[in-house]
Amino acid sequence: MNQAGLQYKRRLKRRHLVSRMFAIICIISTWFGLLVVALLLIGLMFKATGIFDITASSQTELRNWLTPHLLTNHMSSHPEKAGMVAGIWGSFWLMVMTGFFSIPLGVGAAVYLEEYSRENLFTKFIRLNIANLAGVPSIVFGILGLTVFARMFSLFHDFPPIGIPVGIGMIKIPIPFGRTLLTGSLTLSLMILPIIIIASQEALRSVPQSIRHASLALGATKWQTIWHQVLPASLPGILTGTILALSRAIGETAPLIVIGAVSFTVYNPGNMEHVSDYLTKPEVLLTVPSSDFTVMPLQIWNWGTKPQPEFQDLASAAIIVLLLVLLCMNGLAVFLRHHYGKRLDW
Amino acid sequence: MKLRKFMFPTQLCLVLFTGLLICGCKYEEPAGENGAGAKYVVQVAGSSTVAPVSEAVAEAFDNATKIKTNVATTGTGPGMEKLSRKECDVAGASRPIKQKEIESCKAAGIEPIELKIGLDGISIVVNPQNDWCDTLSVEQLKKLWEFESKVKTWKDLNPQWPDEEIKLFGPDKVSGTFDYFIEEIIGDVPENQSPCRTDYTQSVKDTMLVEGVKGNKYALGYFGFAYYVKNKDQLKALKIATKSDLSDSVAPTSETIENGTYKPLSRPLFIYVSRQALLAKPEVAEFVKFYLTEGQKQVSEVGYVRLPEETIKAAEKKVLDILEEGEKK
């Protein structure tokens, strides 16, 4: 074999080595994330189920905190009686209302920016601002929410509440909003809007230009093109982005503390006692937006600050519940992406 | 497109939503629901030190009377602000109200009524493995915590102690515990200067401080008595002496805090109730009365120290007098 052939072989070997090393680095990065999550989960599981707690003292009672009444009981100063039902319902309604406010606004803004706006200084400025807003710490949104929604710049004193008629009655809205679910959801909506806008923009951009051209060429208006072709095609991406943004909102504590969400309460939003109340008693449903609330992360935080060490373990159990809810939401995002991804039939 | 099916409800929602915004009008209470039907929910805010007590009282109050209470943990300062804005009826405080706060309440037409509800002794705590230090004098504490303190190791405090760095843990500056500790130990500080040294681990969460002291043999920290009591076997509380020869050293216990011999770090815990809310809302009056009678059991349950009987009785009388006076008018 000649010199060049030998050299080639050696180089080939080295190139393959580099290639393999790169693969290994990538695998390590993947497993690193997984390992951290696994460690966290295992530690939490041990603490929550009372098998083992490294920080526990001999005074601490080790027991299984992951019980059904963690999900059904109200908060209590006795760890064995304490539950997080108010937090679960609070988080649920906060999510529903945040979605109600943020999705139309976010998708609308994205459609305007992608489909209608011309590239000029003004839209560039808007885009830059949205990207910046996505990085603003959540507590800043909390302060904003406190002045704008909860107190409305102290402009209104003893203002009568406003009623909004819906089919089954009136929704009572206090002015200013105070520390209600309405304030909470509007604040969180502002917080996740930039994320939704950016995700939706990406999704809209990924729709091939040829689809728009074809639709317009067949005589469809811009509205018809966007509503019937572009939006459905980008729906999986929009939904994924939205659900991921909502999962960020569900884990937020700081802005909610600032707007004055309560950390201890013994009733669910709207004073609901049974789930069936939402169906049989419309007034319960109607008072939800103007109801005081607490959320799961806030309860976890509250338990984490209690002097009794048992509450630390209880907080671990609550974190597991919160993680499960998050997992379900992310699962839903994956499902929707697949489901609607398949149904495209141009 | 098959997706039209999915899109229709979205469209409907959008139209409805806009419609609602446009025709929003004045709310009228549905008949029968106002008055006796729906009870007022008592709103409590304020100090995170007092919050565990308020929560326990709120729970017992709900069980006894079915009147609901919400507690928001905001910290003493923001709690006072909420009181002055009528956003809460009762504010917990781990320090007495400041003159500025009284004035802002007055400006809003609120008169805060001060009620002592329990006692706390700020505990100076070390790791149980620490076998050299049992007692510190106030003077030593001041030397240790003051601004630009020269004390780095245990040896700097007492030449017989190990030459190891002291790991310090303390609450952060928004805390009422911090305010009280600085006032009692360090005293007046010039403005525009940090009231104490800055090279220590600060945390809003007292449990973080507990963990920190637990985990380090050479650690020293201070926090509320309840956090020490509930983790007693993993922490060691130091005796505090006001004289420099340590002859009058006292350890924090329920007794020494109650009878005031644990000096100078035992302090009262307060609730402030707005006089206006007390008179206008019977639920608030019930809650405050409950707090000062049966609710007192919760004070020791949570880990704080109960006030002497007479003090509580006097506070209760204060409330009853105000209510009576209100009735006469």
Image (tube, coloured by chain):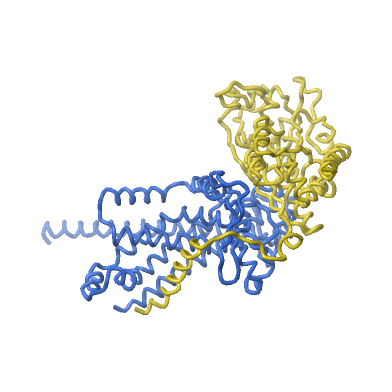
Chain colours: A blue, B yellow
Residue at 71% across, 42% down: B92
Is residue B129 visible from the viewing direction of this image? yes
Q: Is residue B28 above or below residue B158?
A: below
Residue at 36% across, 78% down: A343
* Residue A339 in the image, given as x and y percentages of width and height: 41, 75
* Residue A99 in the image, given as x and y percentages of width and height: 49, 62
Q: Is residue A61 above or below residue B229?
A: below
B261 sits left or right of A57 in the view = right
Looking at the figure, which quarter contains the C terminus of chain B? top right
Looking at the figure, which quarter contains the N terminus of chain B? bottom left
Residue A228, quarter of picture: bottom left
Residue at 75% across, 48% down: B280
B248 sits left or right of A9 in the view = right
The answer to which of B275 and A242 lies nearer the viewer is: B275
* Residue A285 in the image, given as x and y percentages of width and height: 61, 67
Is residue B177 visible from the viewing direction of this image? no
* Residue B322 in the image, given as x and y percentages of width and height: 82, 41
